[in-house]
Image (cartoon, rainbow, N blue to C red):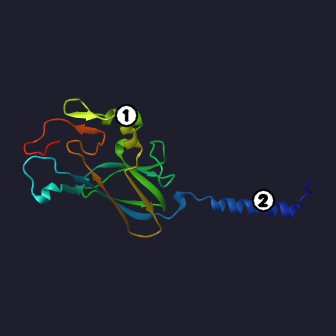
Amino acid sequence: MMGKLPPYLFTLLVLFGAVTSCSSIKNKSEEKLYPVTLSFFIHTPYCGGAYPGPEQQKGYTNPMNLYEFALYEAAEQFGFHQHTNKLIQKFKVDSKGEILLNLAPGNYYVVLADKALPFKTFYTKNDIGDGVTNNSSDEACFLQWYRTPDFRFTVIRAPEQKHSRTFNAFCYNGLNPCVYYIGPLPPSSPPR
């Protein structure tokens, strides 16, 4: 059995514990913020029509003009997205597909704005298969797409940080990987 501590020793232990616990609790709102430029582009493949030249066959890449996104703090560097994760902010990129944010050091991820919705709402909104021009994959495809962050990045203690992401579009369906086009092909299109 431990004996009684002298009052001054007990007071020193309490003060030491309070000082060390307070100094170790530091949330992101107290940390210095660093400017981070995020740039978003979309690559659209050649989808048929007139016979393409070599450059046209490569498709084209443009800024994601005025797209909306949601920024989350990443609990784990390679974790899955859930709409209940800590949302930092929603934002819309400018006409150059860019936004400047001030962020504390740490790991973050970005998703298209629809992924900030609960899954069932996201699924209903994005399941556009009609059986005439588009067919949809099963719900598991939509869940995998929903849970996968679109862009991960780390903010470090350094000025002028830039991160960019190029999304790959699908012919006739934009960024939706779970719907595929079954309608008529344009003239001169390669066979399916």
**Tag 1: amino acid:** Glu
The residue identified by callout 2 is 14
Q: Residue at x 44, y 65 (%)?
A: 34
Q: Which quarter of the figure has residue 39?
A: bottom left
- Disc 2 is placed on an element classified as helix
Looking at this view, is 129 or 100 the one in front? 129
Whether 164 is drawn above or below 116: the answer is below
Q: Mark 1 or mark 2: which comes first in sequence?
A: 2
Q: Residues within 10 Å of mark 2 (few under 14, many from 20)?
A: few
Q: Closer to the observer: label 1 or label 2?
A: 1
* Left or right of 85 in this view: 15: right
- For the residues labelled 1 and 2, the Cα–Cα distance comes to 55 Å
Q: Which mark is residue 139?
A: 1
Q: Position of residue 70 (x, y in %)?
A: 39, 48
* Left or right of 11 in this view: 40: left
- Disc 1 is placed on an element classified as helix
* Left or right of 17 in this view: 189: left
Where, quadrant-wise, is the C terminus in this rendering?
Answer: top left
Residue reaching furthest bottom?
159
Q: Residue at x 45, y 62 (%)?
A: 155
Looking at this view, is 41 or 30 the one in front? 41
Residue reaching furthest top?
131
Number of numbered discs on residues: 2
Residue reaching furthest front?
191
Q: Position of residue 62 (x, y in %)?
A: 22, 56
Q: Residue at x 90, y 56 (%)?
A: 2
Q: Residue at x 76, y 62 (%)?
A: 15
Looking at this view, is 49 or 32 the one in front? 49
Q: Position of residue 51 (x, y in %)?
A: 7, 51
Q: Residues within 10 Å of mark 1 (few under 14, many from 20)?
A: few
